[in-house]
Image: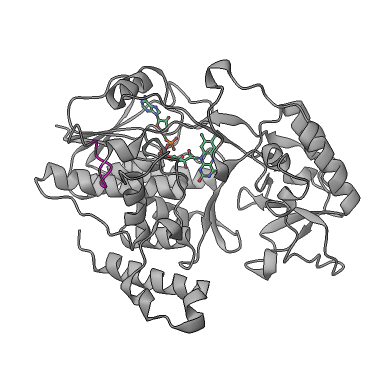
Amino acid sequence: MSELFVVGAGLAGCEAAWQAAKRGIKVTLFEMKPYRYSPAHKSEGFAELVCSNSLRASAVTNAVGLLKEEMRALGSLIIEAADATSVPAGAALAVDREKFSAYITDKICSEPNIEVVREEVKKIPDSPCIIATGPLTDGELAGEITSLCGAPLNFYDAVAPIADASSIDYEKAFFASRWDKGDEGDYLNCPMEKDEYKAFYDALISAETVPTDKTDEGVNVFEGCMPIETMAKRGEDTIRFGPLKPVGITNPKNGKRYYAIVQLRAENREKTMYNLVGFQTRLTWPEQRRVFRLIPGLEGAEFLRYGVMHRNSYIDSPRLLDDTYMLKSRPGLWFAGQLAGVEGYVESASSGLVVGIAAAAHLCGREPPRFPRITATGALSGYISDPFTADFQPMNINFGIMEEPDAMSALKGKQKHDKRARAEIRAEAALKYINGYGN
Ligand SMILES: Cc1cc2nc3c(=O)[nH]c(=O)nc-3n(C[C@H](O)[C@H](O)[C@H](O)COP(=O)(O)OP(=O)(O)OC[C@H]3O[C@@H](n4cnc5c(N)ncnc54)[C@H](O)[C@@H]3O)c2cc1C
């Protein structure tokens, strides 16, 4: 007899189901693939990474690195899978997406406390349930969520294209990591002189984009995933200070530096595919082919996947959820993942982890644990449930939403402004708490 329903076997749903099952709860996990696919999902496997293969920075002095380390210490299935299937990516943790998904699917399907049902859920069950259907939630279930939450779900995001490695011109493109961090083979750089940049820039800002659906007019573009052409339109140098910034990169073949650089990152261990870092876009596909082929090294590029725009739905969590992601008006119903207003793979998995632990505690009649905001885990759940937030926007983890630990006040003079020293103190305090936490 099932004690907990989990809807959606994405990053959040898998992590939540795993955490609850590991605490002795019988879980039924619903996944609509392969009978129905969202516009971004393509494979039958669980925890499918629909765009970048990167789980971002590794170092604990970076907020997302710290979040991953906390999750590792808390027994996260998603981080275990990422560590087991990682591909070289400099100072970041990137994965082979197929192996990553296969690892998680296998673990979930062989966990005795989890029953997997491949079926689309259209109604929110009356029994204890976690909704983790992701940013593309639609159809009848979206309608149910809308009536439950009393407000429509609307938002936008965009995805970067992927090029076939064998179609890249390696006479022009060169391998190097910024500031020589990580392996020099992790990033492939397409360098631009000033005139090449200008030609590319002009083509980019005047290229044709996919028209916005009438019903979606007026919704926002998330700042952290802004289409490259939208960013470019803010000013001729904006993208040169963003995804095309050339600083810290020297061509090892000739010692040269450049006016702008487009970085490509390997999609898989075999390095047969590369994504254009920061090139999420809503240019039409023919325009992507024309404009991105102006990038030196990509003149003959074959694009294995073009960038696309997509809906990114989330609920008004600060009004609706508590800091265990539970609906305040209906105890026993939780939201996890992007739908709850966290942004990104790691953040979605983190919310699933907190929800899985909380749901297990709830079902056993115990108070769920609350992670303090000095931890990255607690900062995220605190952010999405903070009733004082006005104009709520999905958020990647960052130090700005974390509380400062007491030890920070011990910093004196210049040290107070030393970003690294501050980050180290944060990491130490957060990991001390997490490592001492008994669940
Ligand atoms: C196109 C696109 C590109 C993105 N790019 C990035 C990126 O590069 N980096 C990044 O960090 N984040 C990216 N994101 C955000 C990303 O979706 C989240 O970070 C993460 O995948 C969200 O995890 P989730 O578990 O909430 O949802 P998902 O991973 O989307 O999982 C939801 C699951 O629920 C299933 N499902 C949906 N509805 C139902 C139903 N009614 N019944 C049963 N099953 C259902 C789906 O099939 C899916 O398997 C992107 C999102 C999209 C849509």
Residue 143 drawn above or below residue 327 = above
Q: Is residue 324 magenta?
A: yes
Residue 105 drawn above or below residue 252 = above
Foreground residue among 282 and 285: 282
- Give the position of the N terminus as an image quadrant: top left
Residue 371 percent coordinates (x, y): 27, 57
Foreground residue among 334 and 391: 391
Foreground residue among 414 and 281: 414
Query: Image point 76% across, 55% down: which residue?
Result: 189
Left or right, 215 with respect to 115, comes to right
Residue 428 drawn above or below residue 92 = below
Left or right, 64 with respect to 73, comes to right
Residue 290 percent coordinates (x, y): 82, 33
Residue 119 seen in the current view: no
Q: Is residue 269 magenta?
A: no
Magenta-highlighted stretch: main secondary structure?
loop
Q: Residue furthest bottom?
A: 413
Q: Which residues are magenta?
A: 322-327
In which quadrant of this rendering is ligand 1 seen?
Answer: top left
Q: How is the image coloured?
A: one colour
Residue 80 percent coordinates (x, y): 40, 56
Query: Image point 69% across, 57% down: which residue?
Result: 187
Query: Image point 81% across, 44% down: which residue?
Result: 298
